[in-house]
Image (tube, rainbow, N blue to C red):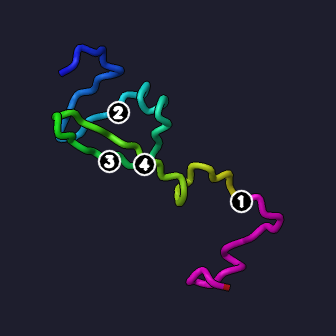
């Protein structure tokens, strides 16, 4: 091990470890993101953050349509007009 000071530390519990908030903020890690783990030949651990920004609700602002709807009137039992 190197003599460098750790950026943050967490404890393993039930085969899971939390990513400290300081690290999540610094690397912009959010729900749905993936972590790729690699053990290098020298025994060090490398973790790559793969950000999943498409297909999530990260940037969803809601529907701002002009028409009001009444689902009970506008749709049949199957949700289709």
Q: CA distance from mark 3 to mark 2?
A: 14 Å
Name the residue rendered at 43%, 25% in the picture.
22
Answer whether labels 4 and 1 touch (C-beta < 8 Å).
no
Q: Residue at x 37, y 28 (%)?
A: 20
| Quadrant, the N terminus | top left
Identified at 40% across, 43% down, the residue is: 49
Q: CA distance from mark 4 to mark 1?
A: 28 Å
The mark that comes first in sequence, 3 or 2, is: 2
Q: Nearer the viewer, mark 2 or mark 4?
A: 4
Q: Gap between marks 2 and 4, in whole Å?
A: 14 Å
Report how far apart the C-alphas of labels 3 and 4 lie in the structure: 7 Å
Left or right placement of residue 30 versus residue 62 in this view? left
Q: Which residue is mark 2?
A: 19
> In the depicted view, which residue is nearer to us: 62 or 69?
62
Q: Residues within 10 Å of mark 1 (few under 14, many from 20)?
A: few
Q: Which of the two labelled residues, at mark 1 and mark 2, occupies the earlier sequence position?
A: 2
User: Looking at the magenta stretch, what is its main secondary structure?
Assistant: loop
The answer to whether mark 3 and mark 4 are in CB contact below 8 A is yes
49 versus 55 height, above or below: above
Counting other residues with Cα less than 10 Å from the Cα at mark 2, is it few (<14), some (14-19), or many (20 or more)?
Answer: few
User: Which residue carries the number 4 mark?
Assistant: 50
Q: Which numbered disc, 1 or 3, marks the residue that appears first in the sequence?
A: 3
Q: Which residue is mark 1?
A: 63
Specify the quadrant that holds the C terminus: bottom right
Is residue 56 rendered to the left or right of residue 41?
A: right
Name the secondary structure under disc 4: strand
């Amino acid at each position: 091990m190197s003599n460098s000071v750790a950026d943050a530390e967490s404890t393993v519990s039930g085969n899971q470890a939390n990513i400290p908030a300081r690290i999540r903020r610094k690397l912009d890690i959010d729900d749905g993101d993936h972590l790729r783990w690699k053990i290098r030949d020298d025994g060090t651990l490398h973790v790559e953050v793969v950000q999943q920004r498409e297909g999530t609700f990260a940037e969803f602002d809601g529907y701002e349509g002009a028409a009001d709807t009444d689902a009970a009137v506008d749709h049949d039992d199957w949700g289709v007009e």
